[in-house]
């Protein structure tokens, strides 16, 4: 049984090494295109908005789901008790930021 596990661990390590090597190869092949695209798009404001959405949406939607395992350990697993206040807090903070930006432009 130990021999089988050692072989499986070795195969697992080799397969992940191949996956990482593939990722590195693809990254090297697309790096000139990505570098040129990023350099040409950094002049505008759209990349900051896009980056904010890419980071912000998973944080807002997924943060309460992090508490799901601890909730199921001690309770029935009603993670909305955590999610709804979190979403209200994020909504209020977002509204404050929007109000500050709207009033600062005038």
Image: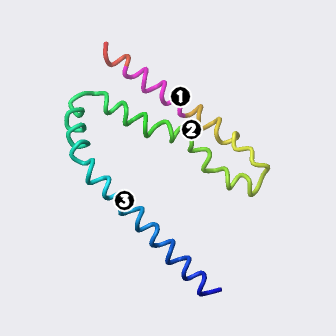
Residue on which disc 1 sits? 92
* Residue 41 horizontal side relative to residue 13, left or right: left
Q: Position of residue 55 (x, y in %)?
A: 43, 40
Q: Is 93 a magenta residue?
A: yes
Q: CA distance from mark 3 to mark 2?
A: 31 Å
Distance from disc 2 to disc 1, alpha carbons, whole Å, reads 15 Å
Furthest-top residue in view?
Answer: 106
Q: Find out whether residue 44 is within the magenta segment.
A: no
> From the viewer's perspective, is residue 37 above or below residue 68?
above
Pick the front one: 12 or 88: 12
Q: Which residues are magenta?
A: 90-101
Residue at image point 56% right, 44% down: 63
Mark 1 or mark 2, which is nearer the start of the sequence?
2
Mark number displayed over residue 67: none
For residue 22, the mark is 3
Residue that carries the numbered disc 2 in the rendered image: 61
Say which label, 3 or 2, has the lower sequence index: 3
Residue at figure coordinates x 43%, y 23% from the top left: 98
Q: Residue at 71% x, 52% y: name it.
A: 71
Secondary structure at badge 1 equals: helix
Q: Where residue 60 appears, x then y in whole percent?
A: 53, 38
Q: Quadrant of residue 18?
A: bottom left
In the visual, does 21 lie left or right of 66?
A: left
Q: Secondary structure at mark 2?
A: helix
Q: Is residue 56 above or below residue 12?
A: above
């Amino acid at each position: 049984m130990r021999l089988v596990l050692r072989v499986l661990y070795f195969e697992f390590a080799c397969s992940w090494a191949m996956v990482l090597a593939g990722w590195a190869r693809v990254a090297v092949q697309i790096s000139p295109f990505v570098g040129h695209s990023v350099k040409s798009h950094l002049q505008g404001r759209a990349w900051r908005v896009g980056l904010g959405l890419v980071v912000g949406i998973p944080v807002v939607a997924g943060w309460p789901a992090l508490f799901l395992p601890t909730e199921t350990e001690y309770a029935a697993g009603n993670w909305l008790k955590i999610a709804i206040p979190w979403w209200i807090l994020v909504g209020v903070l977002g509204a404050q930021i929007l109000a500050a930006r709207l009033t600062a432009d005038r």
